[in-house]
């Protein structure tokens, strides 16, 4: 901190006395010292601590310079301090803004940057302290006005009806946006609904298969959140959305249970025909697919193929061969078609034998 900045903070003239210095220091301490902020919010206490550090630094500078011959006021040094302060306000790049999902508020950031550039341009032309202070202060005021417009738009985009806490509009842009993100997490209807969805679905954590089905459960939750968003989080729609969410999740568990039961029903037959390479291969494929993706679309097809092969193995002569697509049957298993030919020939021979004719 420079000597000029210390004078400005204490609002003292160059010829101040030790009594004036101590008096203002006591006044500022009573206003900003953390001991007087015990009932304030954490954010306000942190802000007071930072301000108290500046006050102490300024006091040390002014006390050390008391009675000394002061350095002649340098307008160029003073202008540089003010320009540096304005530069620090826009302390982000567009990539950072995009990562915070705030790119839809881009026009406000553009306005802030434009206001800073214009303020700096005016200050650079000024030749006295009064004009520098005027242009600096009016730039800060204009930036605060833009930030307030930004907050109004931000609240509409995030379905925030009311912010029950004070916003610090004087913070640099990165800290200001972090403040908004914190507000969004606490007060946006989307965040509140997400917390409700997570609370409603906690009961399923004790269900069998939960860890395996977590991907599908999260998808169901995301669908519910998007549906609520499409309906602008209207209270009249939310209960129905939650009801449908429970139905969808229970359906996921039902499908899982049905498929697990189907696989389990084949256990004895699989053990019986464990030496059959085709049965073993089909079952291994079915089981691996079920373990990696219990609700995959190939399950029914794989299960039916396995069941058909087992049935052929157990009762080849009792199968109904009518309406069979023999080309497809041969492609899937050439032995099936040979079995059909043998079976047909046997029936023909038996028929001829009963008539006593050839």
Image (cartoon, rainbow, N blue to C red):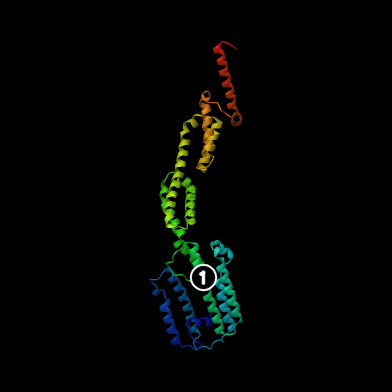
Furthest-front residue in this view: 236
Q: Is residue 175 visible?
A: no
Left or right of residue 95: residue 190: left
Residue 155, x across and y down, in percent: 48, 64
Residue 117, x across and y down, in percent: 59, 74
> What residue is drawn where x is 58% and y is 27%?
336
Residue 114 sits in quarter: bottom right
Residue 345 vs 140, above or below: the answer is: above
Task: Return the residue nearer the eye: 94 or 47.
Answer: 94
Q: Quadrant of the C terminus?
A: top right
Find numbered disc 1 in the image and state the secondary structure of the residue it sits on. Answer: helix
Left or right of residue 162: residue 351: right
> What residue is drawn where x is 45% and y is 72%?
47
Residue 94, x across and y down, in percent: 58, 65
> Which residue has dot 1 on it?
147
Furthest-left residue in this view: 39
Task: Return the residue nearer the eye: 326 or 293.
Answer: 326
């Amino acid at each position: 901190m420079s000597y000029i900045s210390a004078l400005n903070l204490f609002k003292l003239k160059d010829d101040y006395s030790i009594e004036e210095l101590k008096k203002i220091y006591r006044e500022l301490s009573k206003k900003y010292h953390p001991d007087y902020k015990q009932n304030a919010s954490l954010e306000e206490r942190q802000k007071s601590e930072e301000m108290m550090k500046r006050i102490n630094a300024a006091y040390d500078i002014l006390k050390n310079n008391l009675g000394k011959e002061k350095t002649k006021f340098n307008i160029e040094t003073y202008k540089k301090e003010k320009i540096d302060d304005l530069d620090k306000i826009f302390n982000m790049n567009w990539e950072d803004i995009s990562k915070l999902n705030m790119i839809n508020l881009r026009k406000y950031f553009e306005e802030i940057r434009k206001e800073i550039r214009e303020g700096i341009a005016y200050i650079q032309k000024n030749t006295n302290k009064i004009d520098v202070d005027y242009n600096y202060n009016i730039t800060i005021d204009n930036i605060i006005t833009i930030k307030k417009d930004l907050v109004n738009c931000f609240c509409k985009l995030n379905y925030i009806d009311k912010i029950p806490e004070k916003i610090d509009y004087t913070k640099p842009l990165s800290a200001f946006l972090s403040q908004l993100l914190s507000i969004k997490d606490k007060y946006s209807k989307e965040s509140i609904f997400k917390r409700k969805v997570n609370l409603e679905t906690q009961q399923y954590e004790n269900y069998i298969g939960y860890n395996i089905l977590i991907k599908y459960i999260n998808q169901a939750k995301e669908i519910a959140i998007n549906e609520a968003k499409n309906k602008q989080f209207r209270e009249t729609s939310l209960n129905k959305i939650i009801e449908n969410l429970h139905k969808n999740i229970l359906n996921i568990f039902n499908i899982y249970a049905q498929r697990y039961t189907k696989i389990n029903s084949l256990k004895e037959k699989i053990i019986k025909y464990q030496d059959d390479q085709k049965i073993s291969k089909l079952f291994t494929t079915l089981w691996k697919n079920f373990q990696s993706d219990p609700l995959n679309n190939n399950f029914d097809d794989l299960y039916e193929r396995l069941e058909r092969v087992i049935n052929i193995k157990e009762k080849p002569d009792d199968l109904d061969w009518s309406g069979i697509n023999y080309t497809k049957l041969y492609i899937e298993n050439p032995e099936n078609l040979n079995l059909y030919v043998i079976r047909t020939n046997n029936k023909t021979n038996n028929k001829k034998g009963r008539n006593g004719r050839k």
